[in-house]
Amino acid sequence: MKREYYESPKPGKIMQWLWKAAGSDGYILKKCTYSDQVKYACLGGIVVATGFMAALAGGYAIYTIFEPKGSALDGGVHTSTAVMSCFFGVIWGLIIFNIDRFIVAATGKGDGTEAITWQEFTNSLPRIVMGLVIAITISKPMEIRMFKSEIDAELHQEQLEKRKAYEIATKANYETRFNAIDAEMEKIEKERNKLLERLTEVESQYTEEVRIVRPGPKAAALKELMDSLGEKLKTFDKDKKAGLDRLISERLKLTQELDRELAKNQEVASGLDGLLERIKLAHEIAGFWITFFITLLFVVIELTPIFFKMMLIKSPYDFISENVKELIRAEDGIQIKYEYYKDKKGQERNLVIHHQVQRKIDEKVALMAAQSELSDYIIEKWKEREKKNIDENVDAYISESK
């Protein structure tokens, strides 16, 4: 807008877009000073930056949740998960951008001074709480991305410990079943060894007896005993073969089952590679104060527009905006009498008068009153006419009534 004393600068497309992001009126800002234009562009820039950070944080959080689990040190990017995360990140960023835009646009300017009064603060408390929640939501995924290398190293160590602990626990669970099978096999083996030792002993005695002297009654008795023990050993092997084969088969199946369970230790350890575990490790690695100040940084970015608007001194933009609102209200026949009456609690209230509505009501009331008056006049005239007819021919009315 051209003036003799001041010419408002012509804003660019980016500045106008930032004005929209801040929820401000571009039509009015084009008529205002450059300082007003910059202030609201900066507000819009903060809102856009918050939405952008929310998109990054949301996308990374979704990727961390849905990426294929494995060793923390495994590199590479899972393409389909990355595409899904980018799509969700954009949606999440737009949601946060819209919420922030509403918060900033709905936050008033308070009393128009730099001081933030207690009343202004309490009025903005719901918006501040929403801003805190958004800031914390954004900060946590950003923290785990900042400390990714340290978290991966620590997480890999935890995964190794988890695998080892799972392996020990799994073997302990199968140990009782292995011991029961081994005890039965050992019992059979002891009985067979006992027979085999006795047979070996008799064979040795027989060989010694035959070598030293001529075969006699003793050698014959030893030979008979040796043959008897050999038959017992064969019978024992035959009787125990089915049971021994069963035990060997059961032990083989149990070993294969154990191997399958042990093969799951990688899957169990990979379960640690999630968002919650990474956030916990980020707090442990960085410590309380570092994570606190990172979160505080995002809180400051998120809440700056709210406090900034409460600290704004009234400028031409505010006065022109109020003037435009008053003109629109006047054009539509709306009158506000500020602090016109007190409510039951003694608080000053404004009286809002809708003149166009009142005019319509007055017209309707006047029309209904006129209609009522005309109806009364018609009835009165009808009564006069009927009275005249009765006076002229009373007998006809009497017979008609009968």
Image: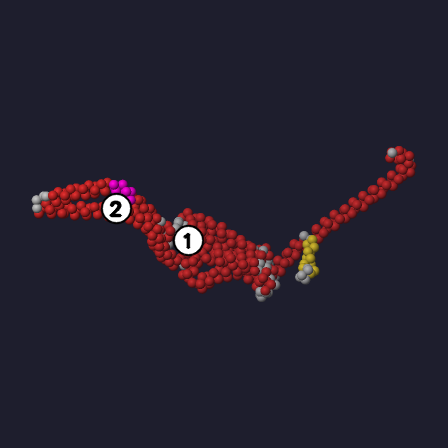
Q: Is residue 32 visible?
A: no
Quick check: marks 1 and 2 in contact, CB under 8 Å? no
- Callout 2 crowding tier (Cα within 10 Å): few <14, some 14–19, many ≥20: some
* 130, 373: nearer the viewer: 130
Mark 1–mark 2 Cα distance, whole angstroms, equals: 51 Å
**x then y, percent, for residue 137:** 48, 56
Question: Which residue, as the protein is rendered here, is positioned at the far bottom?
Answer: 115
Amino acid of disc 1: Gly
Query: What amino acid is at disc 2?
Result: Ile
Tell me which segment is drawn in magenta.
Answer: 239-247
> Where is residue 384 shown, x and y percent of the image?
87, 41
Q: Is residue 402 visible?
A: yes
Residue position marked by numbered label 2 in the rendering: 188
Q: Nearer the viewer, residue 402 or 253?
A: 253
Compared across the picture, whether 390 is left or right of 159 comes to right
Q: Residue furthest front?
A: 217
Residue 275 picture quarter: bottom left
Question: For residue 81: magenta?
Answer: no
Task: Classify mark 1: residues with Cα within 10 Å, few (<14), some (14-19) or many (20+).
Answer: some
As helix, strand or loop, the secondary structure at mark 2 comes to: helix
Q: Which residue is mark 1?
A: 274
Q: Nearer the viewer, mark 1 or mark 2?
A: 2
Q: Residue at x 89, y 33 (%)?
A: 399
Q: Quadrant of residue 121?
A: bottom right
Residue at x-position 81% and y-position 46%: 373
Q: Residue 287: horizontal and vertical position, in percent?
A: 42, 63
Mark closer to the chain start, 1 or 2: 2
Return the residue nearer the eye: 253 or 92: 253
